[in-house]
Image (cartoon, rainbow, N blue to C red):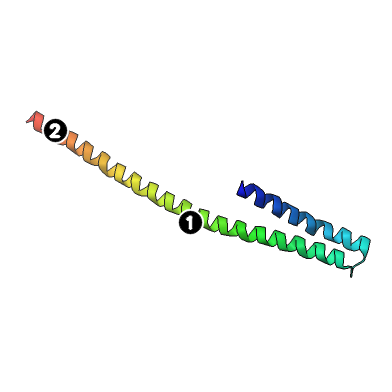
């Protein structure tokens, strides 16, 4: 739910940024309303982008850790498989003698 709320806020901010030039054209370049709309939209969008960057940084670190863990698990499994094959070969060799 938190992610959806942030996406909505960021979309709202981006919409304000997009509408700001229209408001400025209708009300005049130096109008306080146009300036406020533009500033608010930029601020909301920037905060959403900052949050998105932080989430991406943290999630990429998590993905790297999970990948490293899976790699270690794969190595352990490969080692166990090699040991099991060696045990079977040893058992065959001792039966054949």
Q: Residue furthest top?
A: 96
Residue 17: image location, x then y, percent: 78, 59
- Percent coordinates x, y for residue 74 in the rendering: 35, 44
Describe the element under mark 2 as helix, strand or loop: helix
Outermost residue toward the bottom?
Answer: 30
Which mark sits nearer the N-terminus, 2 or 1?
1
- How much space separates mark 2 and mark 1, taking CA atoms? 45 Å
Name the quadrant containing residue 77. top left
Neighbour class for label 1 at 10 Å: few (<14), some, many (≥20)? few
Residue occupying the point 88% across, 63% down: 24
Q: Quadrant of residue 37?
A: bottom right
Direction from residue 4 to residue 89 in the image, left or right:
left
Measured as percent of width and height from the top left, residue 19 is found at 83, 57
Q: Secondary structure at mark 1?
A: helix
**Does 46 appear above or below 69?**
below
What's the mark number on residue 61?
Answer: 1
What residue is rendered at 43% in x and 53% in y? 65
- Closest to the observer: 37 or 67? 37
Vertical side of 77 occupied by 27: above or below: below
In the rendered structure, the answer to whether residue 52 lies left or right of residue 86 reads right
Quadrant location, the C terminus? top left
Front of the two marks 2 and 1: 1
Residue furthest left in the image = 97
Label 2 CA crowd tier, 10 Å (few <14, some 14–19, many 20+): few
Q: Which residue is denoted by mark 2 in the rendering?
A: 91
Which label sits on residue 17? none
**What residue is at 51 percent from the left and 57 percent from the top?**
58
Side (left or right) of 91 relative to 39: left
Query: CB of mark 2 within 8 Å of CB of mark 1?
Result: no
Q: Residue at x 26, y 41 (%)?
A: 80
């Amino acid at each position: 739910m938190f992610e959806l709320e942030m996406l909505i806020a960021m979309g709202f901010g981006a919409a304000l940024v997009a509408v700001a030039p229209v408001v400025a054209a209708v009300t005049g370049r130096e109008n306080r309303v146009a300036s406020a709309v533009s500033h608010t939209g930029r601020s909301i969008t920037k905060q959403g982008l900052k949050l998105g960057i932080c989430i991406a940084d943290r999630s990429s670190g998590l993905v790297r850790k999970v990948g490293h863990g899976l790699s270690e698990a794969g190595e352990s499994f490969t080692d166990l498989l090699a040991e099991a094959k060696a045990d079977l070969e040893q058992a065959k060799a001792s039966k054949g003698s």
